[in-house]
Image (cartoon, helix red, strand yellow):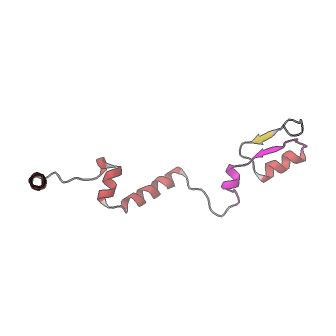
Amino acid sequence: MINGDAIISASSDLDEYLIRDLKLQGAKITLWGVGTNLITSKDCVYTSPNTNEIKQNCKRELATLWDESRRLRNPQNVYVDLSQKLYDLKQSMIKLHRQTKSKML
């Protein structure tokens, strides 16, 4: 309350035209909740992308990442080599690491 008077607020997609119309009609509003149209102006040259445009942009950007990075976010969508040769290499590296580690102790 300001000076004992009630505060009347209005919000919900207010823009300059709706505020002007409400004032011309004599609305006694003391607090205007302007958010969406303040940030995303209807007159702006830039238009907000729709959901499909956002998804397409995400797919394009994701495609530019290295496979190693994409695997962290979407492991089910990235091919992983499970060949015997790779498995044997992995096992030999683990064995070598364990041998080296045990010699250090």
| Closer to the camera in the image, 23 or 94 | 94
* Nearer to the camera, 98 or 32: 98
Q: Residue at x 91, y 43 (%)?
A: 26
The spot of residue 98 in percent (x, y) is: 11, 51
Q: Residue furthest front?
A: 105
Residue 26 falls within the magenta-colored stretch: yes
x%, y% of residue 77? Answer: 30, 50
How many badges with numbers are in the image?
Answer: 0
**Which quadrant of the figure contains the N terminus?**
top right
36 to the left or right of 54? right
Q: Position of residue 105 (x, y in %)?
A: 12, 51
* 65 up-or-down from 7: above or below: below
What is the quadrant of residue 25 in the picture? top right
Magenta-drawn segment: 25-43
Q: Residue at x 67, y 55 (%)?
A: 39
Question: For the point 29% across and 47% down, which residue is it?
Answer: 76
Horizontally, residue 58 falls left or right of residue 50, namely left
Q: Is residue 19 magenta?
A: no
